[in-house]
Image: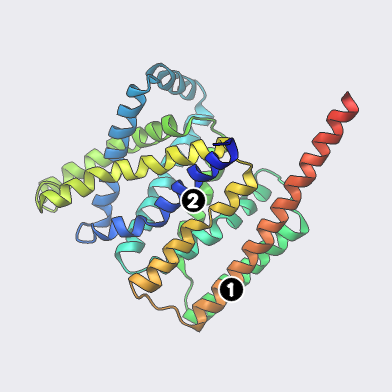
């Protein structure tokens, strides 16, 4: 199997798993969303840490921790990244278990565009006219939904902005994906454990109290968090960025279909109009990314030929 095909399979598997996440979190709808979150943090740490030991990267993990501790700016960025990804996880779980699956889909559709906008604002990255057009069209889509609803789609926007913020913070930290998840969950681990002690004392805990099925689902939440991340990391190394950028829209598309077909969430003309603007912006954005990537490849090729 050639490298590109293998990379595409890794990426499709990762985004496909993320797409069907609502099916998993719905099984835990009877558990408080905050407990699902802290359980996800705890068991993600446990399983990824064990995985790091199994692949004999313990010394690399220690080196990563030492490097972060020496660089206080990077350490603060990691703290921020850990906090916002936890917020993103909570918002997604809350959305799924409170009948806002379509809103979650919208959030992940517009997230790449917010990420690009953040790149322009915080990293002085230049956007092409097509990319600027894509952001404007997406804004019109969100605005039309806001006017149609009579209120701002807060869940979708918070999901999009929290993940875009996470991406911006992570851009400053060059960590292996799996070891990075170990460290990020390690940072949030004390808070998660304290919360579990609290709900245990108030008899509001579901873990070990409801059923063995619930316990298994809460524990396996750590595995289903880690597996797609590892697959994504493998795919990202083998594929150009624009291919990854195109495949990533699998996730919100699957989530949208689940929300409408399986969970029968409303999808009126208002939602359809808004999503049409979002889909148009994605087409424009993907097209501009492909053009920009090909242009850079051509420039690099020309430069290499001149150097020869």
The residue tagged 1 is 276
| Left or right, 174 with reference to 57 | right
Q: Earlier in the sequence, mark 2 or mark 1?
A: 2
The residue closer to the viewer here, 3 or 207, is 3
The residue closer to the viewer here, 37 or 276, is 276
Determine the CA span between mark 2 and mark 1.
Answer: 22 Å
The single residue placed furthest to the top in the displayed view is 59
Instruction: Judge the density around disc 1: few (<14), some (14-19), many (≥20) Cα neighbours within 10 Å.
Output: some
Which part of the image, by quadrant, shows the N terminus? top right
Instruction: Identify the element where label 1 is drawn.
Output: helix
Q: Is residue 34 above or below residue 54?
A: below
Q: Is residue 104 visible in this depiction of the protein?
A: no
Disc on res. 96: none
Q: Is residue 23 above or below residue 41?
A: below
**Residue 224 position within the rendered picture, expressed as x and y whole percent measured from the top left:** 33, 45
| Left or right, 108 with reference to 181 | right
Instruction: Identify the element where label 2 is drawn.
Output: helix
At x 39% / y 31%, what residue is drawn?
183
User: Which of the two marks, 2 or 1, is nearer to us in this view?
Assistant: 1
**Residue 138 position within the rendered picture, expressed as x and y whole percent measured from the top left:** 61, 66
């Amino acid at each position: 199997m050639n490298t590109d095909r293998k990379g595409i399979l890794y990426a499709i598997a990762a985004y496909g798993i993320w797409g069907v996440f609502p099916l998993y979190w719905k099984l835990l709808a009877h558990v408080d969303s905050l407990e699902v979150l802290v359980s996800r943090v705890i068991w993600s740490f446990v399983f990824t840490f064990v995985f790091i030991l199994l692949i004999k990267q313990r010394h690399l993990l220690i080196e990563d921790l030492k490097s972060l501790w020496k660089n206080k700016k990077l350490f603060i960025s990691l703290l921020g990244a850990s906090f916002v990804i936890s917020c993103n996880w909570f918002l997604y779980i809350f959305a799924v278990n409170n009948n806002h699956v379509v809103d979650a889909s919208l959030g992940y559709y517009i997230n790449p565009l917010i990420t690009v906008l953040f790149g322009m604002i915080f990293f002085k990255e230049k956007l092409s006219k097509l990319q600027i057009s894509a952001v404007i069209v997406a804004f019109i889509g969100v605005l039309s939904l806001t006017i149609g609803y009579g209120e701002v789609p807060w869940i979708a926007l918070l999901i999009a902005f929290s993940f875009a913020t996470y991406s911006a913070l992570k851009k400053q930290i060059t960590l292996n994906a799996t070891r990075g998840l170990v460290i990020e969950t390690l940072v949030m681990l004390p808070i998660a454990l304290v919360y579990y002690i609290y709900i245990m004392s108030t008899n509001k805990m579901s873990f070990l109290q409801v059923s063995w099925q619930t316990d298994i689902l809460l524990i396996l939440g750590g595995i289903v968090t880690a597996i797609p991340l590892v697959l994504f990391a493998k795919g990202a190394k083998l594929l150009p960025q624009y291919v990854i950028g195109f495949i990533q829209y699998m996730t919100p598309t699957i989530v949208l279909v689940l929300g409408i077909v399986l969970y029968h969430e409303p999808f009126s003309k208002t939602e359809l109009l808004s999503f049409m603007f979002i889909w148009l912006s994605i087409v424009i954005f993907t097209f501009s990314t492909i053009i920009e990537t090909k242009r850079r490849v051509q420039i690099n090729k020309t430069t290499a030929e001149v150097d020869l």
